[in-house]
Amino acid sequence: MIDHTQHLMEPPVAAEPTVADVVKPARAGGKATHKACSATGRGTVGPDAKADGSPDQSNSKSAGAAARPAERIRARRTALQVLYEVDCTGHRPGIALDYRQAEEGYSAETLAFLYWLVSGVIRYKDDLDSLIGRYAPEWPVDKLAIVDRNVLRLSIFELSSPDADAPPKVVINEAVELAKTFGSDSSPRFINGVLGTALREITLPSDYRQVSR
């Protein structure tokens, strides 16, 4: 159950996970373990990246692809991994995305959804950060945990996009699940509070809330 009455709380201050932790989070006693942010470079640019390293959006025009729910959950997880890597290491998004998606074997529909998510967040990052600053004014975006700010970027992009077709409740619930998996103990509550505020203020298409996932 999403508690939209819960607003902002102090964001987590735990040490950031490594890129490897975000890809395959280590577990100890049911809790994700974190280390300092570090990673090495990736390989050469693959066929799904442009010369500047940005994702190729030519085959991912909208989020209306008929991807199955389980595949979309995986795609959101991969999108977070890519965004975390780009934020943490400065790797080119196209290279990181090409590397991650090659490991997953996604269907064409799910791959289009994944590329739409990552491309959208990269393209509108400044606007999304401004929205995060509006919905969480007590906490500068650059001071938020890397996992938390990228979960928020990803989710606010999907909530605010006219091309999205997932119900807002699904987007928020899955954001909270990502925060539980990859964030600190207080991340889920913080993410839920910020997105609850965002949902009340974002103007969505009239039929958006009625679309079945």
Image (spheres, helix red, strand yellow):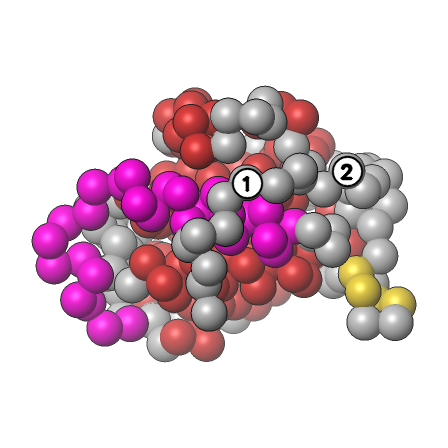
Locate residue 101 relative to residue 34 in the image: left or right: left
- Across and down, in percent, residue 33 comes to 84, 57
Label 1 neighbour load within 10 Å: few <14, some 14-19, many 20+: many
- Across and down, in percent, residue 185 comes to 74, 55
**Residue found at x 33% / y 66%:** 109
- Residue 193 is tagged as none
User: Callout 2, which amino acid?
Assistant: Val
Mark 1 highlights which residue?
Answer: 8
Q: Is residue 47 above or below residue 33?
A: above
Q: Is residue 118 above or below residue 142?
A: below
**Residue found at x 44% / y 47%:** 195
- Across and down, in percent, residue 174 comes to 49, 63
Mark sitting earlier along the chain (2/1): 1
Location of residue 134 by image quarter: top left
Q: Is residue 206 magenta?
A: yes
Mark 2 highlights which residue?
Answer: 13
- Which quadrant, please, contains the C terminus? bottom left
- Disc 2 secondary structure class: loop
Label 2 neighbour load within 10 Å: few <14, some 14-19, many 20+: few
Q: Which residues are magenta?
A: 187-213
**Residue found at x 77% / y 38%:** 13
- Disc 1 secondary structure class: loop
Location of residue 120 by image quarter: top left
Q: Choose between 157 and 111: the one closer to the eye.
A: 157
Q: Choose between 106 and 8: the one closer to the eye.
A: 8
User: Callout 1, which amino acid?
Assistant: Leu
Q: Is residue 156 above or below residue 100?
A: above
User: Is residue 90 visible in the rendered structure shown here?
Assistant: no
Q: Is residue 84 magenta?
A: no
Locate residue 137 relative to residue 87 in the image: left or right: left
